[in-house]
Image (spheres, rainbow, N blue to C red):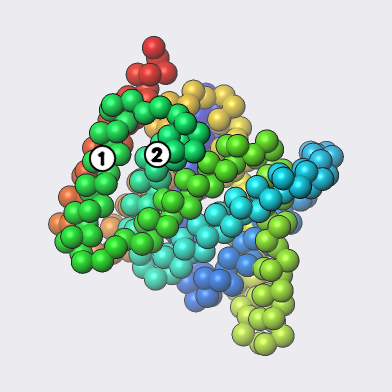
Amino acid sequence: MMGAAYALGAFLIWGGFPVFFKLLDQVPALEVLGHRIVWSMVFMGLLLLFLGRWRAVGETLANRRLVLTLGLSALMISTNWLVFIWAVNEGRILETSLGYFISPLVSVVLGVVFLKESMRPWQWIAVFLAVIGVVILVAQAGQLPWVSLVLALSFAFYGLIRKVAKVDAFTGLFVETLIVAPLALVFLVYLVIDGSGSFTNLGLDGLLILSGVITALPLILYVQGAKRLRLSTIGLIMYITPTSHFALAVFVYGEPFTTAHLICFAFIWTGLAIYTFDASRALSD
């Protein structure tokens, strides 16, 4: 019961991210990213100190190969965060929803390519349906849904890299943010000196600091939930996040939902239903 509560909390928080970052839509996406990185590092550092895990941090930093691996994962997740923040600010939340619906299927393909995992026939069908959906959207809209594709690819590659990196979730996130924090800090200091930064705005300071907390909090809940639940259960609950993004985009923020979008999402939802059913059946065998 507690495992489901933890996982549900994590995916609900992730699902509500568009609402939070909409509050910061007057702040440039790159500046929000800088604060998100820095305050995530601070929060995770304090958490690791409280948990007494600094030894794990030292061991990780002493492993040059692991640091390089986490540097690559930091690049992937930073790209994901930046594109997501920009998309929310630009009123393109529907595209973020599409990206996170596609991401699990992209992860399956990456597993085949890089980890030599095998795909069952129904999984190939699920991926094929998703590809058809995206192709239809491109044909109808006349442009590539690059936001969706970047989010899907960056998050899937991030998951792949973290899968092979021998480090726990908390230490990994701290080191990832530690690696990119110097660049973020230099950029934020420059904005302060230049007078163009938003951190001196009392109404935004708390939200910018909170961006670090809400980045780390769902990860903590997710890790606790994943320890207690079957993978198939986690796979079902995770669709709360893109479904929430979809509902917010269409019903709250009034983003246009065209016939092309409907057809595209229908193919992807069908593919995900097949993928989820097949994964659940495989785990029960």
Q: What residue type is labelled 1?
A: Phe
Q: Residue 128 carries which label?
A: 1
Q: Which residue is drawn at 76% across and 47% down?
A: 64
Q: Residue furthest bottom?
A: 194
Point 23% across, 41% down: residue: 129
Q: Which of 97 and 134 is in front in this view?
A: 134
Gap between marks 2 and 1, in whole Å?
11 Å
On residue 208, which mark appears?
A: none
Residue drawn where x is 22% and y is 47% of the image: 132
Most foreground residue, 158 or 90: 158
Mark 2 and mark 1 lie on one chain; the one further toward the N terminus is: 2
> Is 178 on the left-hand or right-hand side of 135?
right
* Rendered view: 187 above or below 139: below
Q: How many neighbours does mark 2 have within 10 angstroms: few (below 14), some (14-19), or many (20 or more)?
A: some
- Which residue lies under the disc numbered 2? 109
Residue 67 image position (x, y, % from top left)? 72, 49
- On screen, residue 198 versus residue 146, left or right, reads right
Can you see residue 2? no
Identity, as a three-letter code, of the amino acid under mark 2: Val
Is 163 above or below relative to 80? above
Q: Residue at x 44, y 38 (%)?
A: 113
